[in-house]
Image (tube, rainbow, N blue to C red):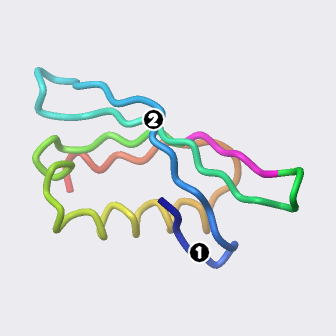
Amino acid sequence: MGIETAKGHWGIFVEHVAETQGGRNLLVKIIVEQSIDDEHFRMRNLEIALNAKDARDPDRASDIAKRIVLWIETTDGDGFIDCSNS
């Protein structure tokens, strides 16, 4: 999956998903990558806490993607987003 941001195109790759709080929430480890040229790329790690019901709802996918875009555009380096209560 890819995503367009003000900082260019980024690939989104889910590395790991774990249930937390008795299955009510999910902790998702994501790698976001941006190609710099044919041989180099920029990589950032992102962990997202999600309500398990929201994570399984296709109608919420665009909201989650918007949160990822905002994180990419407003931060540098690795990070964490808590969407478990949204």
Crowding at dot 2, Cα within 10 Å, few <14 / some 14-19 / many 20+, comes out as some
Q: Nearer the viewer, residue 47 or 9?
A: 9
Taking the spot 64% from the left edge, 70% from the top edge, the residue there is 9
Foreground of the two, 83 or 52: 52
Name, please, the residue furthest toward the front: 38
The x, y position of residue 86, in whole percent, is 20, 56
Q: Residue at x 87, y 51 (%)?
A: 40
Q: Amino acid at mark 2?
A: Lys
Helix, strand or loop at disc 1? strand
Q: Nearer the viewer, residue 39 or 70?
A: 39
Label 1 to label 2, Cα distance in Å? Answer: 20 Å
Q: Is residue 31 left or right of residue 19?
A: right
Indicate yes or no whether the magenta region holds residue 85.
Answer: no
Callout 1 amino acid:
Thr
Magenta span = 41-45
Location of residue 49 in the rendering, given as x and y in whole percent from the top left corner:
32, 40
Q: Which residue is mark 1?
A: 5
